[in-house]
Image: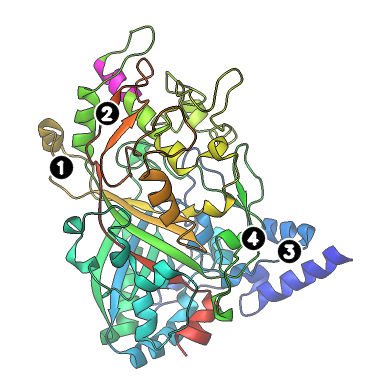
Amino acid sequence: MRISCVLTAAFSLLSIGQGVLGVPGPSPGPNLVGRQTRTTPLLAVFPGQDTLPTLADIINLNATNGTFLPLQNIQGDIFVGMKKQLETFYFFHINDATSFKTALKSYVPTITSTATLLSPASSQPLAFVNMAFSSSGLKELGITDNLGDQQFSSGMYADATNLGDSLSNWKSTYAGTNIHGVFLIGTDQTSYITSYLSDIESTFGSSITQLDRIDAAARPGSEAGHEHFGFLDGISNPAISGFSMNVLPGQAIVPTGIILASRPGDLTIRPPWTLDGTFMAFRRFQQKVPEFNKWTLDNAIQNEAKTLTVQQGADYLSARMFGRWKSGAPTDLSPEVDDPTLGADPQRNNNFDFSHLGSLLISDQSKCPFSAHIRKTNPRADLGDLNTINHAIRAGTPYGPEVSSSESSSNTTTQDRGLAFVEYQSNIGNGFRFQQINWANTANFPPLKTVTPGIEPIVGQGSPRTAEGLDPANQSKGYTIPQFVIPTGGEYFFMPSISALTSKIAA
């Protein structure tokens, strides 16, 4: 009886204004681009990633569990992770609040829900559009509610030095609180990006001014799904209660409220309209790829048998810096050689926790250094898997061109490339900010080790930039590591539910 009632409620709520199973029909912009029919899914599933559930799967799951998530009301990018083939970030300043609100009311039907992204391809739009607002943006619209997040209220520029950033590296666009909001547009064809941007600029007109635009994209060919250093990305996001169908071996499970505001697991009291919204931490990370490649070659390490070439030794060192080989295979499971089959298998590529029978968790770095990227940012057994509140969903996309032959030969970056980093959580201080400051930047994390692990060598910020454990043959050897990932801007945003865009933001 309970399952029947929940199913009835799910179908009823999903169908309000949304069509069958909560899937809206196409929402055309002014140029009617939305009326074209899509024949392939909007999102991609890159190697090593779990597949997304279908909308019907979620309804059945929630009916079985006696829970309900209004997927038609949750903006689509929040749960899907790093599955965008093309993604454009359009940062704007609000010039006229009244005309902006009028435009927003007419534009809300174009905002893409999670239900839409989980629907059959023929029911998906040619591109998804989501939007979020900075604290200064909400204030510009007359919204002064306390959302219960100190970092969001102050903005990332005020927090940058706490994060370890050098403000001299920040683009002037991101300095201060001039950015009021951002549109996220994701698709698989550049022409669709152009059409949807035209829709936005036609709809909002002079009520907004574009401050920055980042055109991001999955890397080409076999590098699709890999970030610019060459490592497979987006394969260790947590499973979300009420959303994730099949929890993968080794995957953390977190309550919905760790990601969505005012849901179970979110312990902060917030205004009612924030329900099913989320805080979005955005970072513009520039990556010094030629310099990274040169440094790993210059510091190449050897395996126990001393059989590696210099290039193989460089790959070995970089794998230990990340805690994964470029294929995504974790060094904890394949410590000395890459295993692409393991890396591409979501049933195995997270099935580890850094503990091994017969070894001491407090001292053994033979398989994965304490300072490795994946260990610093997801410590697993190092914290007894008790850090549920510190999880978040990463959803960024690489930007910039591939490394040119002249850059490779000179070992010098001359073209801007990196990662448009996005992370979603219900509490910035517990999610992104905690991961960056308390884990990546902190030399004595993970705790209770027999040595000082040092800074996380990839995204760790600050000084001294030293780390140990990278050479398994000499684990006490310290490395001074140049800064290969440079924050050049960022902001904290709140991404409201779709209904709140109308009832609160545009009101």
Q: Earlier in the sequence, mark 1 or mark 2?
A: 1
Q: Earlier in the sequence, mark 2 or mark 3?
A: 3
**Residue matched to label 4:** 55
Q: Position of residue 444 (x, y in %)?
A: 40, 38
* Mark 4: few/some/many CA within 10 Å (<14, 14-19, 20+): many
Q: Is residue 235 left or right of residue 444?
A: right
The amino acid type, in three-letter code, at marker 1 is Thr
**Residue matched to label 1:** 413
Distance between the Cα atoms at labels 1 and 3? 50 Å
The quadrant where residue 142 appears: bottom left
The amino acid type, in three-letter code, at marker 4 is Leu
Q: Can residue 189 be seen from the camera position used here?
A: no
Q: Are marks 1 and 2 in contact (CB under 8 Å)?
A: no
Q: Position of residue 251 (x, y in %)?
A: 59, 42
Q: Of circles 4 and 2, which is in front? A: 2
Check disc 4 and report its element: helix, strand or loop. Answer: helix
Distance between the Cα atoms at labels 4 and 2? 48 Å
The magenta segment = 310-316
The quadrant where residue 249 appears: top right
**Residue matched to label 2:** 479
Tell me: residue 301, above or below residue 231.
above
Distance between the Cα atoms at labels 1 and 4? 44 Å
**Residue matched to label 3:** 67
Q: Can residue 462 be seen from the camera position used here?
A: yes
Residue ID at (40%, 59%): 187
Q: Position of residue 262 (x, y in %)?
A: 60, 70
Q: Earlier in the sequence, mark 4 or mark 2?
A: 4
Q: Earlier in the sequence, mark 4 or mark 3?
A: 4
Q: Are marks 1 and 3 in contact (CB under 8 Å)?
A: no
Q: Earlier in the sequence, mark 1 or mark 4?
A: 4
The amino acid type, in three-letter code, at marker 3 is Thr
Residue ID at (36%, 60%): 282
